[in-house]
Structures are given as structure tokens and as C-alpha cells.
Amino acid sequence: MKKIILIITTMILFLDQISKSIIDAYMNLNDRIDLIPNLFSLNYTNNYGGAWSILNNQVTFLIIITIIIMIIIYRYMNTFKNNKRNALAFGLLFGGITGNLLDRLFLGYVRDFIAFKIFNYNFPVFNISDIAIVLGTFLLIIAIIKGEDHVNKSSKE
């Protein structure tokens, strides 16, 4: 299971970093390109906090918390049933978390660029890593609901 998780992690990390690099190359900070008017746009911003800019300008704290969370997830991952959905979930989580962690480590902020306006609400701008984290979390919730989270070693198949 760990090999497939590593492959998925690498793919998500690559997609995240390449998409951020493309945005860096072709847009200026705070530029906006409406792709579907009043629904979907590219809006290049830098996020100096966590989700929804919480803990703004607390980069060192966010880096430390992120590393602790990754260690906890890694240790906890071995208790989950060994199946494709759970491998995908952990790969998405590790890829997404690592993508945003690299931004924080090397830039001091996270690059966001995907923006939706839904029912007149401007949803917070996000990136590929954020999508992967949300999807991975959703898949793990499904696994927990199905009772696949505390599987002993003899029944991991």
C-alpha cells in the first residue's frame, strides 16, 4: 500500500507545484481571469495563514503544526484497511499537505488561484493541494464510517 501512496503523493505534489508555477509565470499577484463569469475564475493570491487565512502571519507555527499532523497521519495510516480507496485517501492527503508545506517553507505563504462564486458567495481562493486535502479527508471519513480505521493486522486485506 505504501508504494501506491507514494506514487499518488508524488503526482499530487507535481500537479500542485506545476500549476502554481504556471500561475506565477503568467499572472501577477491579485490578477483575476474570469473563466465562467459569476462562477469560476483564476484569482492569484498569496495566503499567509491557514485555511480561510486563519492564523495569518503565523508561518512558523503553521509549519510545525503541519509536520506534526503529517507524522500523526503517517502513524495512524497503518491502522486502516489496505485497499485502493484508503491508499488514494492517504496519497491525496500527503500530496496536498506537502504541496502547501513546501510553499510555506520556501516562500513564507501558500499560492492560491482557484476561485468560485456560488450563490453570490465568494468561496475562499484555493489550490490543487487544498482540493487533494479535502478529497483525501472525505475518503478517510468514508473509511471511518465503514469501520475500516481500526483494522488489526490479520484482517487488513
Image (cartoon, rainbow, N blue to C red):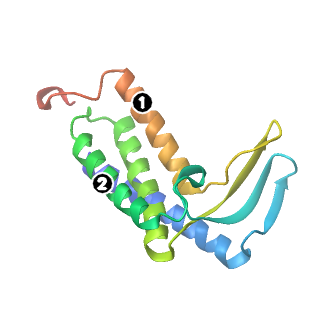
Q: Return the residue found at the far right.
A: 37
Q: Earlier in the sequence, mark 1 or mark 2?
A: 2
- Image quadrant where residue 112 sits: bottom right
**x%, y% of residue 123?**
71, 45
Task: Give the class, few, some or many, for how many residues have Cα within 10 Å of label 1's Cα (few <14, many ≥20).
Answer: some
Q: Disc 2 residue type?
A: Ile
153 displayed left or right of 52? left
Q: Disc 1 residue type?
A: Ile
Residue at x 55% of width, y 52% of height: 54
Q: From the viewer's perspective, is residue 153 above or below residue 30?
A: above
Residue at x 67% of width, y 78% of height: 25
**Disc ID at residue 72:** none
Task: Give the class, few, some or many, for how many residues have Cα within 10 Å of label 2's Cα (few <14, many ≥20).
Answer: few
**Disc ID at residue 141:** 1
**x%, y% of residue 19?**
60, 66
* Quarter occupied by the N terminus: top left
Residue at x 54% of width, y 68% of height: 109
- Image quadrant where residue 155 sits: top left
Element type at marker 1? Answer: helix
**x%, y% of residue 51?**
55, 51
C-alpha span from label 1 to label 2: 20 Å
Q: Return the residue found at the far left.
A: 154
Residue at x 36% of width, y 21% of height: 146
Question: Which of 134/148 is in front?
Answer: 134
Question: Residue under circle 2?
Answer: 68
16 displayed left or right of 92? right
Element type at marker 2? Answer: helix
